[in-house]
Image (cartoon, grey):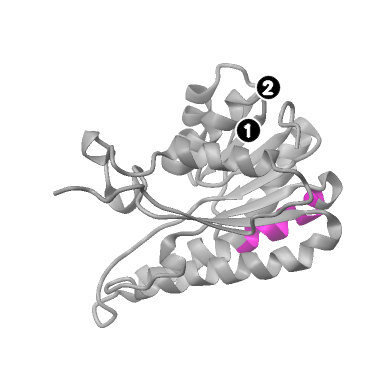
Amino acid sequence: MDLKGKVAYITGGTKGIGYGIAEVLLKHGMKVAISGRKLEDAEKSASSLSSSPDEVLGISSDVTKLSDERNAIEGILDKWGHVDVILANAGVGHFAPIDELEDDKWQQMINTNLNGVYHTLKASVEALKQSKGYYITLASLAGTNFFPTAAGYNATKFGVVGFTQAAMLDLRPYDIKVSTIMPGSVASHFNNNTPSDSDAWKIQPEDIGGLVVDLLKMHPRTLPSKIEVRPTRPDKK
């Protein structure tokens, strides 16, 4: 894919991995829409990414609502006329032993992490058929490796991986490429983390952005449908 002038939509793009991906895509000549639940946050992040309103768009969208995602796609099409790349990145994590996990935390993870990727794809699939585009989910190594205190998070990320792989098979006949990226530890704001120098050993958001670019530039005959990525070396404590 020639990236110059292509349009990407990144959910949960106001900070962390989504923001880092947006930075990299803009550097490669793409136009980028980012969403967050609060319009003020989305517009502030969009302004910090680029001073040109023709390059970046901040959108208010709650991925737990299909109507919000449909409105987001409609806004992108109204502005640029097409959308070529969708990155379903929005996600939350709550961690506690299953007997202590609160029901509202379980429901929030299901609605955001799992229902969210479904809503984003349902809202964008017809536009992707037109552009013969690319749909990418941001899952996690927690989508293949289970661990204590993560029953809810594991359930959603295992679900995201399965959903994405099945959707890949459904959409190949339309020349839509579908992949899931499964990162390990990333220097982001996830789980109330504040990135600092102590996160230097982790994957950086721009590293995920570089991986996305590699996927987009790959020859169309080749599809890495599931990508695991982790820090080269674990933290030395």
Label 1: element kind = strand
Crowd band around label 2 with a 10 angstrom C-alpha radius: few (<14), some (14–19), many (20+) = few
Q: Residue at x 40, y 70 (%)?
A: 145
Residue 39 rendering spot, x and y as whole percentages: 52, 38
Residue located beneath label 1 in the image: 32
Residue that mark 2 sits on: 54
Q: Magenta-highlighted stretch: main secondary structure? A: helix
Residue at screen point 50% across, 59% down:
139
**Residue density around tag 1, few if under 14, some if 14–19, many if 20 or more, within 10 Å:** many
Is 181 placed left or right of 30 in the picture? left
Residue 105 belongs to magenta span: no
Residue 122 in the image: state x and y as whole percent: 71, 60
What are the residue bounds of the magenta stretch?
A: 118-128
- Kind of residue indicated by mark 2: Asp
**In this view of the protein, which residue sits in the foreground, 232 or 205?**
232
CA–CA distance in space, label 2 to label 1:
9 Å
Secondary-structure class at tag 2: loop
- Asked whether disc 2 touches disc 1, contact meaning CB atoms under 8 Å apart, the reply is no
**Does residue 58 appear in this view?**
yes
